[in-house]
Image (cartoon, rainbow, N blue to C red):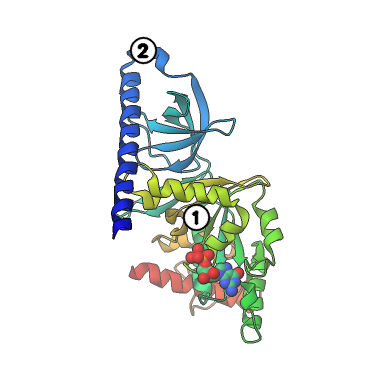
Amino acid sequence: MAQRKLSRRQQWRIEKIQQERQQRLQRKLSHANQQLDPGTLGPEEEGLVIANYGASLEVEDTQGTNHRCLLRQNLPPLVVGDRVIWQRAGETEGVVTARMPRDSELARPDASGQPKAVAANIDQILVVAAPAPDYSSDLIDQYLVAAELTGVPPVLIFNKIDLINRQNAQAIEALLARYRAIGYPVITASSVNQQGLEALRAQLQGHTSVFVGQSGVGKSSLIRAFIPREDIAVGALSRNSGLGQHTTSTARLYHLPAGGQLIDSPGVRDFRLWPVPASTLQQGFRELAPYYGHCKFRDCSHRQEPECALQQAVAEGRISAERLQSYLRLVVQMVET
Ligand code: GDP
Ligand code: ZN
């Protein structure tokens, strides 16, 4: 009981310190905004958003030092991975004044169904699946489609391969062969027996990556395998004592020791396919694309019509029946939702 009281008091003190810090910074910012003293802020610099606490951000300068920054009014929304222009307002504090153009953005629908960015400037999406929880090729396809529509190349990571046995080996081999045939890079890995981790490390090097996939496939375990423990501890700490109320949505960018970055956050992990019309969905199945528009009937549903270019390609073994079926199931699913 005494311990709980103490920790609550500690909690209160931490919050109070954070509040005071926030208020001090806010005062500095309003001071700067009013331009009472133009000397308060340093010159404009480029920076990278490496953590987002809602009310404030952590911005890394070009030397690799972090600064707690507030946002100048009327800025577009900022997310982890954004490149920004900011100005120093003290040793470790600053003000973000502009967002630089994004090369890519990972978005997911907000409460009203509008896409909301959760990370920016990612250049590869690692889609993780595993023997357990049971993988579904439909779900893998949905992640691949979401990556394709985002315009960021996906890589398929088949994880927990220590769980491959005589019962599931053949089906998994066929599944992976199917994706390799389309041209997707496929890496098999296991954090338990360390297999494939070197190949995965090489794949991460020099990229800004995210791990996506259903809960339980081992994303956190993989992240822990690549990021120094201290960095994860810092991330967890700032998550718990971070400014702002919505601490659970804290996203963080981690630098990889071998070069490259990993972005992790609940928002990123929850990335999945959003509702899209069939015409958009088509673009997400890259190997089907060359056949659209070549069916006998312009409004061909690619199910049972004669002279369907897609069915014909399946019959000739140029595209996989499973992928076409997966596309057709997804069309129905999208119409229903
Ligand atoms: P996440 O929800 O995708 O982040 O998955 P976690 O990393 O939290 O892992 C979910 C569960 O799978 C945990 O109980 C892990 O210990 C376990 N797990 C993670 N990686 C592996 C692996 O390579 N092999 C096996 N057998 N289990 C793993
Ligand atoms: Zn057709």
The single residue placed furthest to the front in the displayed view is: 2
Residue 141 visible to the viewer? no
The image quarter containing residue 260 is top right
Image quarter of the N terminus: bottom left
Ligand 1 is within 8 Å of the C-beta of the residue at disc 2: no
Classed neighbour count for the residue bearing mark 1: other residues with Cα under 10 Å, few (<14), some (14–19), many (≥20): some
Q: Amino acid at mark 1?
A: Leu
SS state under label 2:
loop
Residue sitting at 44 percent across and 70 percent down? 330
Question: Disc 1 to disc 2, how far (Cα)?
Answer: 47 Å
For residue 296, side relative to residue 98 (left or right): right
- Which dot, 1 or 2, sits closer to the camera? 2
Which residue is identified by label 1? Answer: 149
Residue sitting at 43 percent across and 27 percent down? 94
Image quarter of the C terminus: bottom left
Residue sitting at 66 percent across and 61 percent down? 185
Which residue is identified by label 2? Answer: 37
Ligand 2 is within 8 Å of the C-beta of the residue at disc 1: no
Residue 232 screen position, x and y as percent: 53, 51
SS state under label 1:
helix
The image quarter containing residue 222 is bottom right
Q: Amino acid at mark 2?
A: Asp
